[in-house]
Image (cartoon, coloured by chain):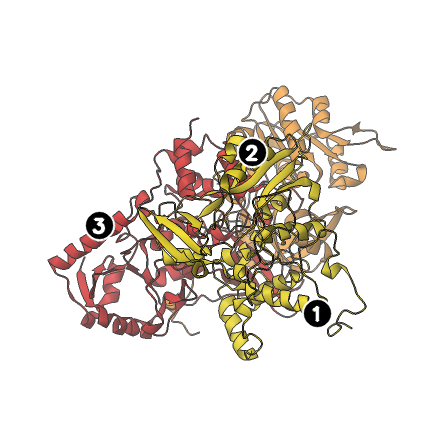
């Protein structure tokens, strides 16, 4: 369990530094089980920071979202660092972006959290619907979540509420950090991602029908893209008009094109935080696409994204022994 | 007007009769959520979700609409798009979603009439369903509305456990229901009392409150307030809040063509995207998320009340439900109310 | 689909344009930011007869398959048989427009927006201050006044461009300079061989011209930064905020106040604009 006091103490020290602009962590949300990103500019702001298994949001998206607006006359660029609270997968996102030269390591101060997995908000909200009052959740040593609602304490086996991506997580400890909150956690017994089980045996028609059902519900809000720390292209191919890769019409054909193209653009880059899937209002199981590509990339190229900032990116390199089924 | 009842087991028969003569939109279950879809049989309908993910506005104001057809190129030719005259029924629409149309009418039927919206508006019957169990972020009561409101529908159904109270609200509703008389009996005094109880319970079930008093005027003085920066910092700029909003009506227009034929289409757009206001010159009047978050709130709570004398929000709570970073419109407006200037 | 006559859709589709033939294309400025003027004639006789506008108003022009954009009408409403728009090559639609030829067909709908109060300004002295392509809506007013010359007082035209090559409507300015009922004050931003008129920015040229504010109306169109300084200088010259007018630009799609994007505060530039007095502009609270 992450010591919240230690987290707050560290964050306060960081935010007090002159070379730090602000630090992004988590705070209690406005209702129920929801948590909220918190921006702290002063040590007082840090007081609201929390960390519990509901802190799922991948905050690595924020340094990417930092807006570079045209400077006014006489205004100087603020080059101070941004502090971030990251779990294993979030840290891997940073590693991957740094590897791609999308961010500079020195611009970040990273508080790493050894992660025991986070709760799937949709699962817990289904279990305890219509929860208005803010709820605190803790994890005990018995792999159970202790959920206090009013005067009642619910003890729920962790597996029932844990996010699916966390069940197959191989890297719960942040590979990149400046401060680590507590001891590294042990890697869980490896489990195949639920969405991939039996995939290869499923007939192609069935697979197509499955995705057709999901893609027709896509409303093309692009929440998947905006929530993804690796979706940071300056101009997304979906927004391009000339040439127009994807039409603006919202229908099965264009929706399929969007979701498949996005998945391919994340091949060898996705770090399995599951953010896209959890923000999707249409519940499209996007991680099944990402996990399939992750698996293929690993098998074909022996590459895992987001582990080493010095490593070359998968699609930025060519190896004579790369499998050549496609282009060559 | 008239109050009737229908036994719950007869509901499917009635709806199937309606389906024979009308295009019926009703909530259909997807994975853990529902959406309005055209149904061919009552069995497809799932009333267990309070609000479909995409609001009912999508039936009158489609996400993708062909505005007209053309022959591409410099010798162009235009072909009008016929607007279907079919009769529409929106079944099981909630009060907040039905209110949408009274908010969108001034936009689509104002100085310039949108023929697509107009035709469908005229051709649709709204059969409402009272909310017995509101969601956590419901706040229609903040606007003086009720989860069992008769105000925006033609016919209102209320689940009285075993039967539905059927309140005929409008002349159109009366004319519509005349064709199906055999399914109904007259409502008793007890039935109406039961509805009152259901409504009272539902209202009590709404725990969140947006305090609207003086907000529109106050916003006029808060354009540069730090609250917009604070909320925009955590906004990731996805358009989800605008897509699931029953009153957001912004759209983009695009030409989609092959070599021989083309169509000018309109698709829902979102003011949360930077491209939305980006000029060809490179200038962007709303370059930062702050500008965009602020504009969304101002549009609903300042500009809309100024222009149309109604708040551009129905209190459905979807934008709160679906926001992944907990930008909470109730909290924002309440903070505006409390802000010291 | 078969329909009885009474259910037939009689309401007009405001998104559907008329067809217009490009009768003449005039190259105003070359280069990467080229400007061309298009003379457009509506194909439908009824539409042509009923198309009435007032200077300041705009039209939506379509290139089918490429898109649609809003342009200020640059011809005068005293011309009944055609309208002209002057277009700078900038984005997708304008690039497509620059590729069409005389005789081609474009889509046209409008007119949209409010207008300059040319009727209300009769009897007044008029000062037009333009920069670059910003001259387009001013040309509409200018030609309107020239066609009704006796109804107005003095007429000053202050216009500037980056270089002499960037001057829009060059031949028309040359003709204009020959008239004795118009004072033309041209400028370019940087010195150039053979240029004997003013060198410097438009706002500075305006201070050289020093038009009197008495019984006058000043209209300025051009890049936002130019407008800002022109207005400051007009105030210095004694113009009050009710005497100063400009037009605003925003990205537009529907042109009829529905699609949402062109708002400044509660006003939609397509419908409530594009013409604003400085008095209105000052009161506007919104992103510009």
Nearest the viewer among C181 and B183 is B183
Tell me the crowding category of disc 1: few under 14, some 14 to 19, or many 20 or more residues within 10 angstroms, Cα based.
few
Measure the C-alpha gap from mark 1 to mark 3: 62 Å
Q: Is residue C94 above or below residue A248?
A: above
Which chain did the image draw in orange?
C
Q: Check if mark 1 and mark 2 are on a common chain.
A: yes
Q: Mark 2 points at which residue?
A: A12
The answer to whether residue B307 of the structure is visible from this angle is no
Disc ID at residue B200: 3
Q: Is residue C217 left or right of residue B268?
A: right
Q: Is residue B121 above or below residue B289?
A: below
Q: Which of marks 1 and 2 is in front?
A: 2
Residue C209 placed where, x, y %?
71, 23
- Chain of residue at mark 3: B
Left or right: residue B283 compared with residue B33: right
Q: Chain B is drawn in which colour?
A: red
* Front residue (pair C82, B193): B193
Chain A color in figure = yellow
């Amino acid at each position: 369990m992450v010591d919240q006091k230690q987290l707050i103490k560290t964050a306060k020290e960081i935010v007090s530094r002159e070379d730090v602009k602000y630090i992004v962590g988590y705070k209690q949300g406005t209702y129920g089980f929801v948590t909220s990103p918190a921006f702290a500019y002063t040590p007082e702001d840090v007081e609201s920071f929390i960390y519990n298994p509901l802190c799922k949001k991948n905050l690595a998206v924020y340094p990417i979202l930092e807006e570079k607006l045209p400077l006014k006359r006489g205004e100087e660029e603020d080059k101070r660092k941004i502090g971030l609270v990251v779990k294993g997968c979030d840290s891997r996102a940073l590693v991957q972006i740094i590897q791609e030269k999308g961010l500079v390591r020195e611009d970040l101060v990273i508080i790493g959290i050894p992660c025991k997995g986070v709760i799937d908000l949709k699962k817990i909200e289904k279990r305890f619907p219509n929860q208005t009052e803010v709820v605190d959740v803790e994890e005990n040593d018995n792999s159970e979540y202790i959920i206090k609602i009013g005067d009642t304490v619910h003890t729920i086996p962790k597996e029932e509420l844990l996010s699916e991506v966390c069940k197959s997580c191989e890297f719960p400890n942040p590979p990149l950090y400046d401060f680590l909150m507590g001891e590294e956690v042990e890697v869980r017994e490896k489990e195949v991602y639920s969405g991939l089980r039996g995939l290869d045996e499923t007939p192609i028609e069935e697979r197509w029908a499955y995705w057709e059902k999901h893609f027709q519900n896509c409303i093309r809000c692009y929440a998947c893209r905006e929530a993804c720390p690796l979706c940071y292209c300056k101009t997304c191919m979906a927004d391009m008009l000339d040439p127009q890769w994807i039409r603006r019409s919202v229908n099965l054909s264009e929706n399929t094109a969007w979701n498949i193209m996005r998945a391919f653009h994340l091949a060898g880059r996705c770090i399995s935080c599951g953010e896209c899937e959890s923000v999707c209002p249409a519940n499209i199981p996007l991680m099944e696409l990402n996990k399939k590509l992750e698996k293929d990339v690993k098998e074909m190229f022996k590459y895992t994204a987001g582990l080493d900032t010095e490593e070359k990116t998968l699609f930025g390199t060519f190896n004579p022994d790369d499998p050549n089924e496609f282009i060559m | 007007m008239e109050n009737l009842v229908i036994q719950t087991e007869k509901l499917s028969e009635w709806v199937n009769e309606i389906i024979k003569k009308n295009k019926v939109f009703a909530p259909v279950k997807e994975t853990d959520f529902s959406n309005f879809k055209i149904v061919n049989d009552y069995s497809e309908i799932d009333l267990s979700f309070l609000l479909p993910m995409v609001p009912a506005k999508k039936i009158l104001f489609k996400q993708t609409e062909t505005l007209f057809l053309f022959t591409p190129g410099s010798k162009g030719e235009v072909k009008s798009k016929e607007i279907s005259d079919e009769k529409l029924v929106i079944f099981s629409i909630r009060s907040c979603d039905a209110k949408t149309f009274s908010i969108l009418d001034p936009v689509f039927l104002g100085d310039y009439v949108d023929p697509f919206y107009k035709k469908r508006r005229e051709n649709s019957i709204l059969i409402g369903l009272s909310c017995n169990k509101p969601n956590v972020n419901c706040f229609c009561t903040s606007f003086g509305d009720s989860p069992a409101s008769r105000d925006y529908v033609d016919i209102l159904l209320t689940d009285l456990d075993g039967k539905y109270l059927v309140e005929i609200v409008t002349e159109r509703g009366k004319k519509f229901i005349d064709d199906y008389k055999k399914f109904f009996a007259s409502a008793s005094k007890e039935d109406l009392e039961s509805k009152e109880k259901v409504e009272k319970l539902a209202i009590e079930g709404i725990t969140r409150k947006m305090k609207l008093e003086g907000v529109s005027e106050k916003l006029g003085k808060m354009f540069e307030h730090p609250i917009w920066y604070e909320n925009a910092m955590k906004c990731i700029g996805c358009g989800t809040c605008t897509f699931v909003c029953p009153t957001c009506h912004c759209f983009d227009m695009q030409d989609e063509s092959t070599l021989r034929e083309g169509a000018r289409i309109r698709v829902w757009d979102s003011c949360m995207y930077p491209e939305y206001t980006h000029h060809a010159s490179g200038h962007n009047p709303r370059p930062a998320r702050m500008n965009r978050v602020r504009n969304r709130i101002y549009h609903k709570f300042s500009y809309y009340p100024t222009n149309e004398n109604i708040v551009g929000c129905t209190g459905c709570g979807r934008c709160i439900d679906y926001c992944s970073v907990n930008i909470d419109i109730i909290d924002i407006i309440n903070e505006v109310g409390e802000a010291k200037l | 689909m078969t329909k009885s006559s009474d259910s037939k859709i009689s309401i007009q589709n405001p998104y559907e344009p008329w067809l217009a033939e490009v009768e003449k294309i005039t190259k105003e400025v070359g280069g990467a930011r080229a400007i061309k003027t298009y003379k457009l004639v509506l194909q439908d006789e009824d539409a042509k007869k009923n198309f009435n506008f007032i200077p300041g108003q705009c039209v939506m022009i379509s290139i089918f398959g490429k898109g649609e954009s809003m342009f200020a009408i640059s011809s005068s409403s005293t011309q009944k048989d055609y309208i002209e728009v002057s277009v700078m090559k900038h984005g997708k639609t304008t690039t497509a427009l620059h590729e069409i030829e005389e005789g081609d067909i474009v889509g046209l709908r409008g007119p949209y927006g409010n207008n300059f109060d040319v009727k209300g300004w009769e009897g007044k002295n008029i000062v037009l201050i333009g920069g670059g392509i910003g001259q387009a809506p001013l040309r509409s007013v200018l030609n309107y006044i020239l066609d009704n010359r006796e109804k107005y007082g003095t007429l000053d035209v202050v216009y500037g461009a980056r270089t002499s090559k960037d001057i829009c409507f060059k031949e028309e300015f040359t003709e204009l300079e020959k008239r004795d009922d118009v004072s033309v004050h041209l400028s370019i931003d940087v010195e150039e061989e053979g240029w004997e008129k003013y060198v410097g920015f438009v706002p500075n040229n305006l201070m050289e011209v020093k038009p009197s504010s008495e019984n006058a109306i000043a209209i300025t169109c051009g890049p936002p930064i130019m407008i800002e300084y022109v207005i400051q200088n007009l105030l210095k010259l004694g113009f009050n905020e009710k005497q100063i007018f400009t037009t605003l630009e925003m990205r537009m799609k529907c042109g009829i106040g529905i699609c949402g994007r062109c708002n400044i505060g509660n006003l939609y530039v397509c419908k409530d604009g594009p013409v604003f007095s400085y008095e209105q502009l000052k009161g506007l609270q919104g992103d510009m």
